[in-house]
Image (spheres, rainbow, N blue to C red):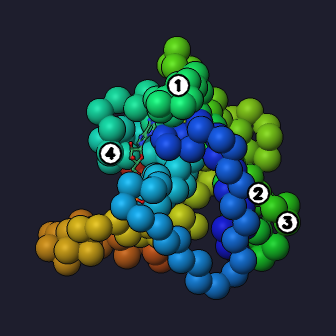
Amino acid sequence: MFLKRLDIIGFKSFAERIEVDFVPGVTAVVGPNGSGKSNITDAIRWVLGEQSAKSLRGSKMEDIIFAGSDSRKALNYAEVTLTLDNTNQGLGLDFHEVSVTRRISRSGESEFYINKQHCRLKDIIDLFMDSGLGREAFSIISQGKVEEILNSKAEDRRTIFEEAAGVLKYKNRKKKAEVK
Ligand code: ATP
Ligand code: MG
């Protein structure tokens, strides 16, 4: 499984539609300060289900919509689609390619899609849970996160290993079943 493609429109500094094709292996994104490198990882975290505006470096979710510049009007929505190569069926779905789309409008509406089919945020979170790609997973390690992991309590660190080992999904299901 690998990240194959990212389509972004209206997300943070990306007013124009941008399409990034990735190939297996290492990709480096380079550019001057403020050019939008971190906005790319923010877009990936957002489409994977990030719900905290703060961790996307904003104060409210609307802050991720392109706010306008000297030469361009603000946009009314943001949309990000992430396409994964799933030929090894790492996501448990019977498709060679899986795309996940998230869209938000200024009026506050959110929409989610898996392979262009309308779905809930929960479906996206479930899809990625235990895949090593989830919103809380360590597939994206931000500045400062390394230290946070090293300094975290043993139980919190255990959760990270459980996600990596693929047992977190079952633990969560067990917890839910016990509550009922
Ligand atoms: P650095 O090298 O300093 O880490 P970077 O390449 O990671 O920089 P980003 O943090 O990705 O840069 O991009 C910051 C830019 O994104 C700023 O210029 C900021 O104005 C712009 N930006 C953030 N949110 C929006 C928005 N909603 N609308 C328009 N521009 C935005
Ligand atoms: Mg940055």
Q: Position of residue 137 (x, y in %)?
A: 43, 64
How crowded pointer 2 is (Cα within 10 Å; few <14, some 14-19, many 20+) is rated as: many
Disc 3 to disc 1, C-alpha distance: 36 Å
Which of the two marks, 3 or 1, is nearer to us in this view? Answer: 1
Disc 4 to disc 1, C-alpha distance: 19 Å
How crowded pointer 4 is (Cα within 10 Å; few <14, some 14-19, many 20+) is rated as: some
Callout 2 amino acid: Val
- Who is closer to the viewer here, 109 or 79? 79
153 horizontally vs 101: left or right: left
99 horizontally vs 147: left or right: right
- Marker disc for residue 74: 1
Task: Decide if ligand 1 comes within 8 Å of the CB at mark 1.
Answer: yes
- Figure quadrant of the C terminus: top left
Which of the two marks, 4 or 1, is nearer to us in this view? Answer: 1
- Marker disc for residue 98: 2
- Contact, mark 3 vs mark 1 (Cβ under 8 Å): no
